[in-house]
């Protein structure tokens, strides 16, 4: 055998042995939470499920909605002559459009809610552009759940969401165009949505791995259903500046209900049940601002 051939043969054998060693010593892949992606998930319980219910109040005088100038697109003013901001929607002291969700927690059997294999809902959630506003203003979906985006206005819109974790997306939708279907693969609280053609239009999408979220209604009420009995950390998020997140620990009994009442506005942290703490505000991109 020639000397050169022996050298190449030795190098080939050496590289093969090195690759085999690396494969044997490779650590299991981990997800963003640091847990092994190969670990088996548990099927969610189906019995003894409970609920978390509550009311979101607003203390003090609520800021008055501001009328929106639609002169740049008269069609908007014609369809919705009373177009106004909806950052803080208060009626009879109750606050709408608050995203309430279980951040984490442990069931009575010691299982973390993140350890369950939560199925993706088959029903799509609709985000409509109607009256030159997004409807709804705040919505929640699970990861990989379909979002159907529609345009009910006689004018063109441009849907542009600016996530921090998921890919950014920007697409125009003329009037009469067919619905657009999109999904989010990663959990994210919350994804800002805007319209580049109508800068006052905005919405927020809460993307969750679990089904444990709700949005407060006009009367401030919300209900999170199908919760396994256990202890949970609940977050309430309101659009705005400082003090827009509140948190509370609750215990859900088997087949029963836990109460989580939240309040925003003046003196909102006083007189609240449970272990309530004000969290540091999370900054979200403002409409028209540059990002990334």
Image: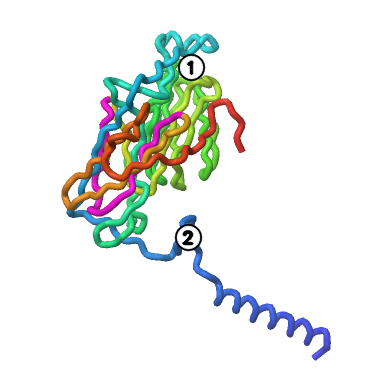
Q: Earlier in the sequence, mark 2 or mark 1?
A: 2
Could you tell me residue 59's position as x and y percent? 32, 25
Could you tell me residue 239's position as x and y percent? 43, 30
Q: Is residue 25 above or below residue 145?
A: below
Q: Is residue 122 above or below residue 35?
A: above
SS at mark 1 in the image: loop
**For residue 275, what is the image quadrant?**
top left
SS at mark 2 in the image: loop
Residue 53 is at least partly visible in this image: yes
Q: Which mark is residue 155?
A: 1
Q: Nearer the viewer, residue 37 or 275?
A: 275
**For residue 99, what is the image quadrant?**
top left
Within 10 Å of the Cα at label 2, are there few (<14), some (14-19), or many (20+) other Cα atoms? few
Question: Residue at image x 52%, y 12%?
Answer: 73
Q: Main secondary structure of the magenta part?
A: strand
Could you tell me residue 171's position as x and y percent? 54, 30
Image-based side of 41 in relation to 15, left or right: left
Q: Nearer the viewer, residue 118 or 138?
A: 138
């Amino acid at each position: 055998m020639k000397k050169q051939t022996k050298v190449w043969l030795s190098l080939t054998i050496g590289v093969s042995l090195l690759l085999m060693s690396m494969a044997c010593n490779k650590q299991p892949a981990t997800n963003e939470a640091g847990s092994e992606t190969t670990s088996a998930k548990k099927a969610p319980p189906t019995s003894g499920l409970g609920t978390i219910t509550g009311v979101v109040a607003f203390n003090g005088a609520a800021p008055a909605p501001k009328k929106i100038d639609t002169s740049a697109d008269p069609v908007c003013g014609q369809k919705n002559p009373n177009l106004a901001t909806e950052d803080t929607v208060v009626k009879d002291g109750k606050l709408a459009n608050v995203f309430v969700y279980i951040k984490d927690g442990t069931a009575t059997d010691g299982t973390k809610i993140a350890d369950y294999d939560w199925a993706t809902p088959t029903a799509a959630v609709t985000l409509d552009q109607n009256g030159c506003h997004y409807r709804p203003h705040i919505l929640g979906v699970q990861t990989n759940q379909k979002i159907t985006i529609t345009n009910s206005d006689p004018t063109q819109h441009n849907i542009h969401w600016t996530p921090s974790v998921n890919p950014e997306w920007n697409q125009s939708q003329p009037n009469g165009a067919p619905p657009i279907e999109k999904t989010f693969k990663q959990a994210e609280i919350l994804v800002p949505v805007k319209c580049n053609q109508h800068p006052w239009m905005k919405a927020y999408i809460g993307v969750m791995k679990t089904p444990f979220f709700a949005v407060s209604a006009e009367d401030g009420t919300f209900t999170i259903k199908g919760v396994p009995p256990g202890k949970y950390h609940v977050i309430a998020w309101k659009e705005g500046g400082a003090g827009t997140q509140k948190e509370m620990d609750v215990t859900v009994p088997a087949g029963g209900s836990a109460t989580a009442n939240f309040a925003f506005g003046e003196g909102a942290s006083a007189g609240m049940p449970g272990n309530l703490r004000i969290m540091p505000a999370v900054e979200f991109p403002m409409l028209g601002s540059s990002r990334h």
